[in-house]
Image: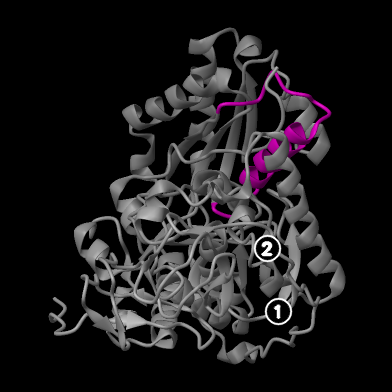
Amino acid sequence: MNRPHKHPRSIRLHTDDNVVVAVDQLSAGASAQGIVAAERVPRGHKMAAAPIAPGEPVRKYGQIIGFAAKLIAPGEWVHEHNVEMHDFAREYRFAEAARPVDLLAEGDRATFQGFRRADGKVGTRNYIGILTSVNCSASVARFMAQAVERTGLLDDYPAIDGVIPLVHGGGCALDVKGEGYHILKRTQWGYATNPNMAAVIMVGLGCEGFQIDRWKEAYGVSESDTFRSFTIQGAGGTGKTVAAGVEAIRSMLPVAAKVVRERMPASELVVALQCGGSDGYSGITANAALGAAVDILVRHGGTAILSETPEIYGAEHLLTRRAANRAIGEKLVERIRWWEDYTSRNLMEMNNNPSPGNKAGGLTTILEKSLGAAAKGGTTTLTAVYEYAEKVTEKGFVFMDTPGYDPVSVTGQVAGGANVVAFTTGRGSAYGCKPTPSIKLATNSQMYRHMGDDMDIDCGDIVEGVSVAAKGQEIFDKILKVASGEPTKSELLGYGDAEFVPWIVGATM
């Protein structure tokens, strides 16, 4: 239990900032850093540290997070009632901060216990997956998994983590030559080949737009002892398809169970970075600590995937400066421009994000949220930018273009090859994932205590004096343990069966 503080605490994150962050709630008349609060300022929210004239930038982290909508006096609560957002020029300064990674010698690198697959990749879990080509086969996929559970087929195979139906809401009524089709095609291939999958069944209806045979031809997939496919129409209906699927799984179990955990270098880890239900502490505690863990992972030769393009909007210039070369930086900017066009043609704007929960937690604009979110990526050189669900092949710190919506974003990262997820949250996201375990990092201790059954690590103690570097080491150590088989809180709760959510782009016809 944290000891009560005599005086409410606040943090000024950069010398150029004209706001301070209330670590504890500030009551009207309370003093923080020599500033008297003119009104109540909730914990995690911002208070003006100096007069901010109408139209003048509001600065946090030493960066612009918005513009004063009216005169803001020192001590006033700074939030959406007096802050607005509009576009402003960012200096991308491509690759100016790129530096060679200080890699550890191979003999000094950390290890974990993982599963080596036939293609050389390393898994942290050992699942059999049931993929669906279309929503019309979703129930049959679930029926297969339920039948396997009822018959107790897994009882003799403790090395197998489970049979998971990965169902979704698309697969038909789409342009089979369009962007949405190709995204779904990449996503399905990515899950079928994720190293946490031991074997896969794909089941379809038969007449859908996303044809299994066409997908198999595109990737050179053949029927084998670790891959089988069926259609309900081809098999003769629901019952026959379920029976065929159960028999296929029965034959896959001995093959999937042969693999055993063995010592693997941390360079085989591909960690997906996520934040959801963010708050005013996110960029100060959990995201900063996860960034420190990423720097450690990269030094050990591993890979970290930052994503959620709408949630680095306004902070992308900090990433382009770290790009290994100009082409990588320009690819990131091109994805930003795509999102500006995408939201515009759908009658939205980039500042539709943050969510109501983010705002209640102290985040005022997407610029503020993005600056905190980008902290998850640490400080090393950006080595690649990928489109959604593309296979991640570069080592080090990379970026994948995804929506900010967590289930869709993680789906793309897992399709890219992520074998662990590190997920920060301030409001208390209850997200979990299969086949890739998700480690939940709480940004504040109050929420960590309140939702202890869901949270794996408390990062709120950073405001009590724990260093970001020490917390980063704690997160890295936890990643190694989870990669070696230690269950996360979301796994213990059974999350993950409903969190496969491919990105649907384009018209549903």
Q: Is residue 492 above or below residue 21?
A: above
Q: Dot 1, how many residues are within 10 Å of its Cα: few (below 14), some (14-19), or many (20+)?
A: many
Q: Position of residue 117 (x, y in %)?
A: 62, 58
Q: Is residue 363 above or below residue 241?
A: below
Q: Position of residue 480 (x, y in %)?
A: 45, 73
Q: Secondary structure at mark 1?
A: loop
Instruction: Choose top left, top right, bottom left or bottom right for residue 399.
Output: bottom right
Instruction: Choose top left, top right, bottom left or bottom right for residue 62.
Output: bottom right
Please tell me which residue lies in front, 278 or 144.
Answer: 278
In this rendering, position of residue 302 left or right of residue 484: right
Residue, disc 2: 399
Please tell me which residue lies in front, 452 or 1.
Answer: 1
Q: Is residue 317 above or below residue 339?
A: below
Instruction: Choose top left, top right, bottom left or bottom right for residue 199.
Output: top right
Q: Position of residue 124 (x, y in %)?
A: 50, 61
In this rendering, position of residue 427 left or right of residue 193: left
Residue name at image x 44 percent, y 36 percent: 498
Q: Residue furthest top?
A: 236
In this rendering, position of residue 506 left or right of residue 40: right
Q: Which residues are magenta?
A: 169-196
Amino acid type assigned to the residue bearing label 2 in the image? Phe
Residue name at image x 25 percent, y 73 percent: 24
Quadrant including the C terminus: top right
Q: Is residue 291 one of those drawn in magenta?
A: no
Residue, disc 1: 381
Amino acid type assigned to the residue bearing label 1 in the image? Thr
Q: Dot 2, how many residues are within 10 Å of its Cα: few (below 14), some (14-19), or many (20+)?
A: many
Whether residue 374 can be seen here: no
- For the residues labelled 1 and 2, the Cα–Cα distance comes to 11 Å
